[in-house]
Amino acid sequence: MQESKIINLTVRDVRFPTSLEQHGSDAMHTDPDYSVAYVVIETDSDSAVKGYGLTFTVGRGTEIVVCAVKALSALVVGKTLKEIVSDFRGFYRLLSSDGQMRWIGPEKGVIQLAIAAILNAVWDLWARVEGKPLWKLLVDMDPAKLVSCIDFRYITDALTEQEALDILVKAKTGQKNREEQMLKEGYPAYTTSCAWLGYSDQQLTQLCSDALAQGWTKFKVKVGADLQDDIRRCSLIRKMIGPNNTLMIDANQRWDVNEAITWVTKLAEFHPLWIEEPTSPDDILGHASISKALAPLGIGVATGEQCHNRVMFKQFLQASALQFVQIDSCRVGSVNENLAIILMAAKFNVPVCPHAGGVGLCELVQHLILFDYISVSASLNNRMCEYVDHLHEHFKSPTIIRNAQYMPPKDPGYSCEMLEDSVQKHLYPQGEVWRAIEQQGKQ
């Protein structure tokens, strides 16, 4: 590996006015403007290779994540890529356990989002230097090397380093066949694009009809604001997709525990595979109670998109509080921490079904779920990755969906380089898109 030194790290606040058409709307986030804190790492290598990373947000507050990235950047600039990846566990801890900065985490909230943006850029840089898409970098990596990237602190009561190594070594059997299968067929996806909470029934019907025509068989519906409205919308979707296609529902943390049980019981007639984020994302025991109550109805609990870190996931798994693990590529500490979560899920035999959508989340998380299938779980049973059909046109290597399947990316890197023209137009607040919106508001 070349001794390319990181000489600069920039971060920009990039926002898209998705609230204008209610894209992304749910029971708790009624007017999201899909946004990113967008990081670019520059090196002094002869090829001038750069690393691109991001953290997803929903508008206001992105500027706070940008500040946190800037505050952490001094820990990154001046390091060589070789220095970082030769002790990636140590570098992860350097960022997550800084003696003063960790006080405003630790390993959660804005600090964790900022760490994810930086480390996503570092992983992108590493994959580009190796000339591989990130999923292939992970799949080809020696198991011992891969395990050395993970910080096992606080999780050894659930997963030891040796157990992680054993899982990876065992999964070597059939790995080549699974990789070929993915390249040929792709990874199963489900769509959330049809049923945002702010969409009218007419819009929902049209989008669902279009998705069925395109071959989609797995659909998620946003619920949680009004029970009668949920019953009507779930009935509409279930009738459209038929009894054999898959339906999931997502409350985005709207309910108290008992309220969640009562509400979902009344939606059980529509046979959802899971209820997602039924209550506070921090309430592990609450999720366990909901899981136990809904099990006789055949409805699982899914959560994780707002789960802070590997320790939270550890406890969810230990408490049998979820039946579907929803990793997110920006909520926890990048690839390093997601590797730990994927391996814990494998040990507890719980399927990983990533959260995606937003800006760039599909582009990022496809790499992680491909790695999970090829190198860890070796199973597609009850497994799928979320897909949302928004904003992919702003990326240099956008997600490719074929027959409702994620096709493995082939370009080197982590697929999160944005088109510079898109970045400039959507910079907040000075980009031309936001200037135009401000002007309209004054008229």
Image: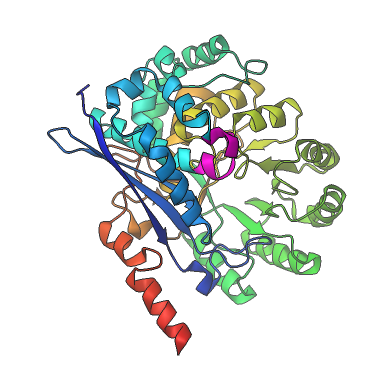
Report how many numbered discs are placed on residues in the image. 0
Quadrant in the rendering for residue 191: bottom right
- Which residue is found at the position 53% from the left and 58% from the top? 58
Is residue 442 or residue 417 the one in the foreground? 442
* Horizontal arrangement in the rendering, residue 55 relative to residue 105 (left or right): left
Q: Main secondary structure of the magenta part?
A: helix
In the rendered image, the vertical position of residue 301 relative to residue 217, given as above or below: above
**Magenta span has 359?**
no
- Is 107 magenta? The answer is yes
Left or right: residue 177 versus residue 151 is left
The picture places residue 237, in percent across and down from the top left corner, at 66, 63
x and y, in percent, of residue 39 in the image: 36, 46
Residue at (40, 72) in percent of width and height? 434
Residue 104, position in %: x, y? 58, 39
- Residue 321 sits in quarter: top right
Q: Is residue 392 visible?
A: yes
Relative to 209, say whether 379 is above or below. above
Identify the coloring. rainbow
Q: Is residue 215 visible?
A: no
Q: Is residue 104 left or right of residue 395?
A: right
Relative to 338, does residue 243 appear above or below in the rendering? below
Give, as a single range, the part of the protein colored magenta. Answer: 101-113
Image location (x, y in percent) of residue 157: 67, 16
Which residue is at the front of the view, 39 or 216? 39
Q: Nearer the viewer, residue 271 or 3?
A: 3
Q: Quadrant of the N terminus?
A: top left
Q: Is residue 28 left or right of residue 227?
A: left
- Quarter of the image with the C terminus is bottom left
Please, which residue is most extreme toward the left here?
Answer: 46
- The residue lying furthest to the front in this view is 100
